[in-house]
Amino acid sequence: MTGQPILIGAADAAVHLGVLAAAGMSRSEIERRSGVNRVTLLRIVRGDLSRVNRRTATAILAVEPVPSAEQAAGWVDGTGTRRRLRALMAAGWPASRLAVRLGTSQSHIRRLVEDGHRCSAVTRAQVVDLYDELWDVSPPEDKSARLARRRAQLQGWSLAMAWDDDEIDDPAAAPHNPAGGRSALLENVVWLADLGDTLPGICLQLGVQPESIWRAAYRNDRLDIWARLTAPSVSTRPASTWPSDQRGRGGRARGAA
């Protein structure tokens, strides 16, 4: 034992992330270099986390500002970029607002949304960061938001809740219809919980991340299961309506839809 606390203040990490962002580094690039999930990075930047694991802070502080020319470059598959932009538009974020936030043109956004089979690694990283920021944020409610939703509805584009983070970039993956749910995963979760297993143990046994369980519970209108697993007496994780550390990257339970 070193006698050092496991959790430390997140302020230094937040300041350093600001330095890295000012140097032009995306959260995806910082994630690649630090090994820290980009959503955890976002929560630190937002101030959602007042304390972080010492190893997390150390990993972030070890990342040095890198010129854009040295960051991941080249062309990549555009599936995830296209799906993320479509999901934001389905939520009411029009191409005009997305273009402003990404510092690009509406025509570029439309190309990515309609036929973006490939895109630059830089564009992908920017869209990933924007998606992480906006997927659960309501846009300003006006005519452009209504038109964006209407267009997405006519095109059959899926909202963010239809995609798991470990599948949205997979060309072979299909969106999960909220009506269909993931009853098999929930059945496995409840079965293990009834045996006395905790949320961390259930995730380990099923090979999923906490967020995958949260999504399954949400889609099936069973957030009572999530509340049960995150109750202070059951798990060391704080009770909440959303996983505290990261959005999911895990697989699905055996037999899940």
Image (cartoon, rainbow, N blue to C red):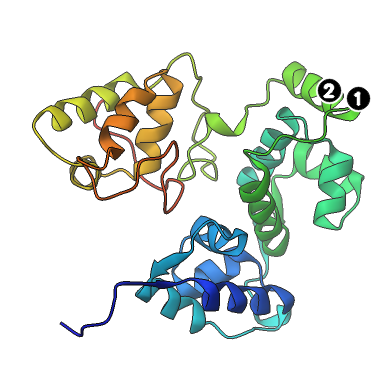
1 and 2 marks in contact (CB < 8 Å):
yes
Residue type indicated by callout 2: Arg
Q: Which residue is mark 1?
A: 143
**Mark 1 surroundings: few (<14), some (14-19) or many (≥20) residues within 10 A:** few
Q: Which residue is mark 2?
A: 146
257 left or right of 204 in image = right
Q: Please tell me which residue lies in front, 84 or 43.
A: 43
Q: Is residue 257 visible?
A: no
Of the 4 image quadrants, the one containing the N terminus is bottom left
The secondary structure type at the circle numbered 1 is helix
Q: Position of residue 69 (x, y in %)?
A: 72, 81
Q: Is residue 113 visible?
A: yes
Q: Please tell me which residue lies in front, 237 or 182.
A: 237
Above-or-below relation of 42 to 137: below
254 left or right of 158 in image = left
Q: Position of residue 4 (x, y in %)?
A: 27, 82
Residue at screen point 22% across, 40% down: 206
Residue at screen point 81% across, 45% down: 98
